[in-house]
Image (spheres, helix red, strand yellow):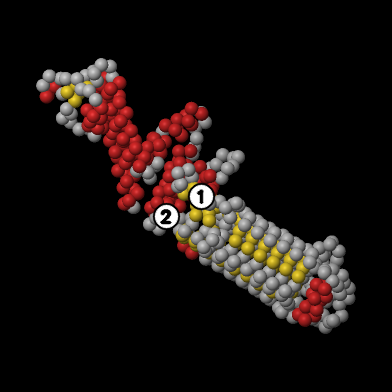
């Protein structure tokens, strides 16, 4: 073999391989690198393919630092042990179509200058693509039976994970998607991490029918993710009951037929709030997420879900900035105006509750008029000599009239205490009615 310069190059290639030994192939270029490691773009692809086939035949899968020219193929290859492509460079298309990796696949810090096609590839062990760089399209319509890590990987072209299956963890933490990121019909059976990821283009997480993408058993983490074009980010027909979006701007993201987590009472909630955690949660941040989701669903003209997130926002407001003193904390969480707002009308989202309060208050006060000493009620002076009144019906009528601030009442309390009770009921009445009207309005007018 001759070097590009035409001079004989003496010596052996000294690139360190995975096992810690030197490559020791015959030097090929001026830098003393062998034909497999040389960065020369005019290398003889056929010669390299022959070398690769020989390696595959003897089950030598150490391709550490190799530079593969255009025309090299690993199509249908079967790697029966750990496969090392650490820091390898693919100058043309990297074809691993229908390849099977029976053990670990190490593509850490590999560079794919052309398309990376892993169509129908199967990774039975750990798939390491940490820090890999895909300069063109990356096609991973593949099956990952073990964990897959694309930590800090860079996808400069389209990232095509359509119908990919991740049976273990799928880690895209801090990955960068410069082009379209398509995870349509993919299946994540383990944890899916997209925390701190950057999406510059279109993003598609789309399920269909039974395929809801994310698992109800494992979390989908989108915390601190950044969407460059949020209006082109789509979550459709997906399960987000275990998804976290804390510190991610989701105001303009398209959520359609999304299944959120649910709190007691069946209202939608975010997993960031409900997840059992040892540390004190950042209620202010979770509240911000709720506010954004509420805004999002209001824009979509979905008042019911927007209302659910309004409840979340109010809950977080009630729980955030807890006073140090336990008594104040208890009072803030249970007896503040916000707490009362919650008890009485579910933060203005529930109109049945204030209605129940109204009925309850009227009944309780009707009973209170009987509990007063002596004959509590008497007929009004205006209708002649006052006479004692018996039975429930007059008391109920009196209670209703106090509640509604109605004048011209046919009955009067006998004692001063009874008058005070009437005034108290008159104070409670109007706010309850207002809360009922507001909740009714909120539910049907939006
Ligand atoms: Zn070498």
| In the image, residue 374 above or below residue 62 | above
> Which residue is located at x 45 percent, y 47 percent?
267
Q: Mark 1 points at which residue?
A: 261
Which one is in front, 289 or 28?
289
**Can I make out residue 79 in this image?**
yes
Whether residues under marks 1 and 2 lie with C-beta atoms below 8 angstroms apart, the answer is: no
SS at mark 2 in the image:
helix
- Residue 192 position within the rendered picture, expressed as x and y whole percent measured from the top left: 61, 56
**Can I make out residue 159 in this image?**
no
| In the image, residue 31 above or below residue 183 | below
| In the image, residue 268 above or below residue 199 | above
Most extreme residue toward the right, as rendered? 11
Most extreme residue toward the top, as rendered? 374
> Which residue is located at x 59 percent, y 42 percent?
277
- Residue 191 position within the rendered picture, expressed as x and y whole percent measured from the top left: 62, 54
Q: Name the residue under label 2.
A: 297
Q: Does the residue labelled 1 lie within 8 Å of ligand 1?
A: no
- Residue 349 position within the rendered picture, expressed as x and y whole percent measured from the top left: 38, 45
Q: Is mark 2 within 8 Å of ligand 1?
A: no
Mark 2, other Cα within 10 Å: few <14 / some 14–19 / many ≥20: many
SS at mark 1 in the image:
strand
Which one is in front, 435 or 223?
435
> Which residue is located at x 50 percent, y 35 percent?
322
Most extreme residue toward the bottom, as rendered? 6
> Toward which corner of the image does residue 357 lie, by quadrant?
top left
Please identify the quadrant where the N terminus is shown: bottom right
Mark 1, other Cα within 10 Å: few <14 / some 14–19 / many ≥20: many
- Residue 21 position within the rendered picture, expressed as x and y whole percent measured from the top left: 86, 64
């Amino acid at each position: 073999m001759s070097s590009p310069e035409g001079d004989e190059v003496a010596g052996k290639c000294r690139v360190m391989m995975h096992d810690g030994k030197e490559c020791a192939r015959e030097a090929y270029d001026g830098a003393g690198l062998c034909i497999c490691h040389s960065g020369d773009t005019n290398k003889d692809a056929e010669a390299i393919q022959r070398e690769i086939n020989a390696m595959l035949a003897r089950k030598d899968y150490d391709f550490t630092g190799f530079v593969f020219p255009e025309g090299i193929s690993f199509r249908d290859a079967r790697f029966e042990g750990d496969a090392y492509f650490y820091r390898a460079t693919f100058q043309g298309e990297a074809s691993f179509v229908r390849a099977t990796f029976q053990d670990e696949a190490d593509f850490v810090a590999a560079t794919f200058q052309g398309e990376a096609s892993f169509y129908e590839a199967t990774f039975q062990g750990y798939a390491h693509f940490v820090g890999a760089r895909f300069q063109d399209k990356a096609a991973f319509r593949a099956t990952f039976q073990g964990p897959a890590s694309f930590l800090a990987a860079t996808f400069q072209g389209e990232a095509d994970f359509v119908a990919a299956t991740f049976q273990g963890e799928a880690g895209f933490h801090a990955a960068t998607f410069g082009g379209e990121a398509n995870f349509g019909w993919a299946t994540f059976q383990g944890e899916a991490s997209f925390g701190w990821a950057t999406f510059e283009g279109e993003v598609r997480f789309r399920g269909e029918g039974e395929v809801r993408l994310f698992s109800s058993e494992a979390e989908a983490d989108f915390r601190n993710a950044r969407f460059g074009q949020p209006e082109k980010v789509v979550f459709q027909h997906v399960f987000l009951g275990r998804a976290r979006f804390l510190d991610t701007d989701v105001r303009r993201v398209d959520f359609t037929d999304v299944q959120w987590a649910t709190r007691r009472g069946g209202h939608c909630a975010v997993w960031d709030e409900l997840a059992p955690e040892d540390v004190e949660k950042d209620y202010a941040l979770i509240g911000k997420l709720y506010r954004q989701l509420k805004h999002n669903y209001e824009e979509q003209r979905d008042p019911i879900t927007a209302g659910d997130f309004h409840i979340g926002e109010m809950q977080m407001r009630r729980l955030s900035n807890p006073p140090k003193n336990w008594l104040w904390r208890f009072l803030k969480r249970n007896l503040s105006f916000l707490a009362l707002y919650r008890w009485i009308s579910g933060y203005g989202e529930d109109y049945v509750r204030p209605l129940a309060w109204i009925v309850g208050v009227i009944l309780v006060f009707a009973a209170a008029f009987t509990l007063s000493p002596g004959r509590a009620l008497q007929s009004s002076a205006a209708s002649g000599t006052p006479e004692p009144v018996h039975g429930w019906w007059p008391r109920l009528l009196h209670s209703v009239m106090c509640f509604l601030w109605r004048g011209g009442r046919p009955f009067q309390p006998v004692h001063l205490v009874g008058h005070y009770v009437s005034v108290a009921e008159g104070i409670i009445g109007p706010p309850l009615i207002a809360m009922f009207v507001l909740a009714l309005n909120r539910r049907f007018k939006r």
